[in-house]
Image (cartoon, rainbow, N blue to C red):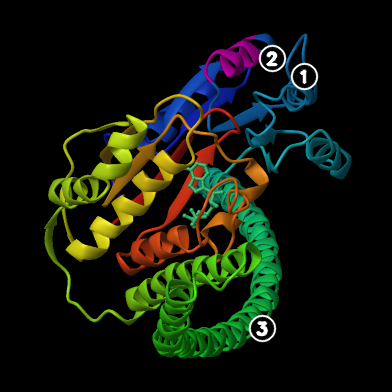
Amino acid sequence: MNNHPPETPLGNILVVDDTPENLRLLSTMLTHRGYAPRCVINGQMALRACNSNPPDLILLDIMMPEMNGYEVCQHLKSEAKTREIPVIFISAKDEVFDKVNAFAVGAVDYISKPFQFEEVLARIESHLTLRNLQKQLKEQNVLLQEEISSRLEVENNLHEKNQSLQQEISHRHAVEKALQEQNVLLQKEIANRQRAESALLKSNQELARSNAELEQFAYVASHDLQAPLGTIASYAQLLEKRYKDQLDDQASKFIGNIVHGCTRMQTLIDDLLEYSRVGRSQKPFELTDCDRALQQAIANLQGAIRDTQAVVSYSELPTVMGDFSQLVQLFQNLVSNAIKYRHDVPPVVRITASKQDENWLFSVSDNGIGIALKHQERIFQIFQRLHTQREYSGTGIGLAICQKIVQRHGGCIWVESEPGQGSNFHFTIA
Ligand code: ADP
């Protein structure tokens, strides 16, 4: 048996008894066995001691004046703070009724006086162990509850995440389906476009072939027409010269008409030949000074400029990759039209160029009669004229030649104009 009390008491025990000897005895023995006993001599003191510092166990006498052990126990069990403290009754009352009553008010045990101290100790020990186990169980229960609620929370979170994942998946499925449908449509569209493209390519090739054929035809026809036309003209002139005296006025007029018709036809043939030559030209492009090309064109038009007192001015023009003689012809056709389709005042013609992205934009403006909007596209087609020969002579080929030259140089040509307000012809060259 260990006679020295341990440094940390085994338990804090409240001993309640109105007999001082009992108190002393129990206190000494408990201290001796390592417990920290507190002793009080009545019920009121016991309740106060429990409230200020709840003990681990109470040894409670039943028979006490003023407040007996049952009442003390009942009080303790009615308060949350003291309800869990195990109470062992120690009493001289040894009736079964007393014991039953003790358990009924909440005691955990009952020891009859006179008691055996070893028995008291054994019961104290076992109830303290029980109490500790209960405490541990309670704590573990709390931990378990916490664990359960945290797991529930995690589970809830997981559930929510799962739901949003399911929603996301079904949304993605819907998007995927829509994409697949669009893909099918796109594939169809691509196939359609490919079909249309190859049809376009075919018709382009066909167009190029028939254009080349037409140019060849125009060239051959106009070339071969020249000789018989020359024969008709010279014989008509010969007729007039040789038989001048024998012909009356009407016959001379008829011959004059033939000669005039031949001259006009010659002009048409010349222009047609020129038109077919543009498309047939194989001359490679070289660095071409547009200033020089324009000056050449102006020189070629000196007669018309002088006759009409036209003022032709231009800003500095660039050097481009092109065909010099075709560029001369392009400027010449545009400037000559600007002079030809004049008002009753001397023509003022201005030629400018400006850089636009990769291209050069050229403009030839005049103060002439102008062109109505509805004619502005068709005048670039061959043989399209807006006037009679009597009003303005011409073949309707000049602008078609211009368009061909511009297209051969990778550009396009158009006009901005209003009747009576002059015209502004624009073309681009890459
Ligand atoms: P042509 O001058 O031989 O008739 P073009 O092909 O050069 O043929 O011109 C086609 C038509 O465009 C002309 O008949 C004329 O009506 C119109 N046109 C061309 N240039 C001008 C201009 N600068 N001002 C007004 N009309 C023009």
Q: Position of residue 98 (x, y in %)?
A: 84, 37
Q: Earlier in the sequence, mark 3 or mark 2?
A: 2
| In magenta segment, residue 147 | no
In the displayed structure, 234 sits above or below 419; it is below
The residue under label 2 is 43
Of marks 3 and 2, the one in the foreground:
3
Residue name at image x 39 percent, y 72 percent: 270
Which residue is nearer to you in this view: 255 or 303? 255
The residue under label 1 is 68
Q: Position of residue 318 (x, y in %)?
A: 16, 46
The residue under label 3 is 188
In the displayed structure, 369 sits above or below 109; it is above
Q: Position of residue 349 (x, y in %)?
A: 34, 33
| Image-based side of 66 in relation to 185, left or right | right
**Spatial CA span between label 2 and label 1:** 7 Å
Q: Earlier in the sequence, mark 2 or mark 1?
A: 2
Which residue is nearer to you in this view: 347 or 314? 347
Q: Earlier in the sequence, mark 1 or mark 3?
A: 1
